[in-house]
Amino acid sequence: MTDAATNTADLQANTDDDEFVPAGPGIEIKNLYKIFGPDPKKWIGAVKGGMGKEELNRKHGHVLGLTDISLSMPPGKITVIMGLSGSGKSTLIRHVNGLIDPTAGEIICDDADVCQMSVEELRNFRRARTAMVFQKFALLPHRTVLENTCYGLDIQGVPRATSEPVARRWIDRVGLKGFEDNYPSQLSGGMQQRVGLARALATDADILLMDEAFSALDPLIRLDMQAVLLELQEELQKTIVFITHDLDEALRLGDRIAILRDGRLEQVGSGQQIVQHPANDYVSAFVREVNRGRVLQAATVARPLPQDNLPDMQLPGKIVLEEAARRMIAAGASQALVVGARNKPRGVLNVSDVLTAMVQPTETNSSQPKGG
Amino acid sequence: MAATCWSLPDALCRFPALDNGTLREVRKTVDGGFRDLVRNYSDWIDAATAPLQVFLNTLERTFTSTPWLIVLIVLLVLVWASSRSMKIVGGTAIAMVLIGWMGLWEDTMVTLAMVSVCTILAVILGLPIGIIAARSDRMQRLVNPVLDVMQTLPSFVYLIPVVVIFGIGKVPGVIAVVIYAVPPMIRLTNLGIRMVDSEVLEAAEAFGSSPRQKLWNVQLPLALPALMTGVNQTIMMSLSMVVIASMVGVGGLGKNVLQAINNQFFTMGFLNGFALVAIAIVFDRASQAFGHRLQKHREVRHD
Ligand SMILES: Nc1ncnc2c1ncn2[C@@H]1O[C@H](COP(=O)(O)OP(=O)(O)OP(=O)(O)O)[C@@H](O)[C@H]1O
Ligand SMILES: [Mg+2]
């Protein structure tokens, strides 16, 4: 079959992304376990030995939050954590800045283990390195937009004379110029979340944690905020951990997507990999409803380069299949050369492959070995 | 009496109380012990209450010896500053002029001084206790039953230990009033801080706040409505207790009311009562309006 062929092209497309990668700190999560309850340490052995969430709760009255999570979040990229309600997303992201202590495991950031930090070190880590955006905004109701944006810097002890210009710049940047002296209660949800974003960006932390930051917004404002975030990220290249339960949002924002289910990682990969090659039934159920024509990219379904007979028509690898089909039909071409950055040839795209990939429901991996 | 006993044995009919001799012994021992204790520590007690005495006397003298017009103007300015409402200021002016006209100015000043001191003390005491109770569940478990007892105890009962320990006078009066007025401040501070939105608190934590920064930036400002209600309640309770404290020698309007009760002076009792009510309304309106003004940011603007 052609599966193997597409696989290789796909991997290629995702590995030699010749983009600039900033040398910031990534976040490395290693074998993280979290058990909620009065005496978590007591049951960690049993959980490591394979006891499930349901059994632990029924027999011992403890809640299994996270099971054996190992995940690396690359610097300067957006890592999306996705999963249904109760899957442990919030629990996971709160480990990154130490709001929750793990039962076992490590969170390494810059050679330092967040879990081993003293209270003082942790406070400084939070002040200098991380910023967080919350689902329900969590703004201070008695402070104006400007004062809210200054908040992180206030805590660091930066005088207002220094922090105000910074805050004004970020308020301007997120599109709230003119609202500096309003109180949060006078703003719409979308505007409040912009304040939340400005507040997080004003501290200039290199790790940005966003827990369902856009989930409370209505769809149009949400798209708008996603655009704002992508635009900012283009320029700032922060290490962003973004939580959502919305696949479209995950695919739009995520350089890497991690899918959680009941506290376990089901699959980690790029959006393209997850849509094209879901690791198991759970993930394929997740991606079944997705509009493949608008998600899959030309490079993902391109076949490897043949030795000769390269087609004349060229298509950028990053465009989605719908767009590729439109261009090929307009040009009357049945084959096109997919190129990467600096016009480097990547593979060949057939119209029939485009169509197959667009209509084919996610390949059922039930017949294949897991993780294939 | 034996007739109502239906041939029950005596112990089941009449309550088997301790006999009078034993009770007398118990009373004598406890009272004597208390008296000795107080006598032994009287210097210490006097020293401890001396600053209070000075504070109270100074304030009372300032209130009573300043010309009434100046006191009235200062009072009106204060009411205006806290409420920004001409209606409340006007009402205050009318009430105070009527009080003065009825010849109760001096007594009212004494009561005002007393209530001010008691409220300030109750807030100074109640706020930190409330904060500590909000921070630790154990502390809350300790404080709550004490507050329950304090709030169910009839106000007269407060006077007994106070009089035994501190004697008769203004200072024991202040102590009784403060003890009576402090529970709502503690309770509402504790409640207000515990009700603060946990997301906002988590945000403060996530940005690296120290406990002190959390308290000042988040917990106290967000608990402000509850705190203001606490202050308001404390003022009201001070006012009502000031009347009862006149039994241990506190002067002012309360003393007049007490005399009126003892001598059945209807008009005198009524007028003094009216003056107390008027002061209560002024304090209540002014402090509530102040609380609302601090909450301006809660108003949603519709334009
Ligand atoms: N403090 C806690 N004590 C006990 N159980 C907890 C606690 N916090 C979370 N849990 C449990 O851990 C699991 C994961 O919760 P978590 O809040 O991380 O889910 P989530 O993926 O963020 O869900 P949502 O999309 O609803 O926010 C849930 O089963 C929850 O009941
Ligand atoms: Mg959550």
Image (tube, grey):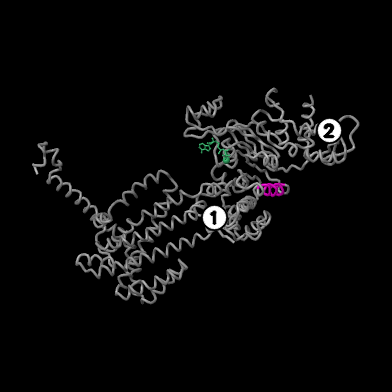
Res A13 → quadrant: top right
Vertical relation: A29 (above or below) B161: above
Q: Amino acid under label 2?
A: Asn
Q: Secondary structure at mark 2?
A: strand
Instruction: Tell which circle, 2 or 1, labels the residue nearer the N-terminal end.
Output: 1
Q: Amino acid under label 1?
A: Pro
Instruction: Name the dominant secondary structure of the magenta segment.
Output: helix
- Which mark lies nearer to you, 2 or 1? 2
- Callout 1 crowding tier (Cα within 10 Å): few <14, some 14–19, many ≥20: some
- The alpha-carbon separation of the residues under discs 2 and 1 comes to 57 Å
Which percent across, then down, holds residue A222?
A: 65, 47
Assign ligand 2 to one image quadrant.
top right
Quadrant of the image for the C terminus of chain B? bottom right
B210 relative to A234 in the view: left or right: left
Residues rendered magenta in the picture? A222-233
Res B237 → quadrant: bottom left
Which percent across, then down, holds residue B160?
A: 24, 55
Identity of the residue drawn at 60% across and 36% down: A84
Quadrant of the image for the N terminus of chain B? top left
Tag 2 near tag 1, CB within 8 Å: no
- Callout 2 crowding tier (Cα within 10 Å): few <14, some 14–19, many ≥20: some
Labelled disc at residue A350? 2
Vertical relation: B252 (above or below) A275: below
Magenta segment: does it hold B260? no
Residue linked to disc 1: A141
Identity of the residue drawn at 67% across and 53% down: A174
Magenta segment: does it hold A224? yes
The chain containing the residue under callout 1 comes to: A
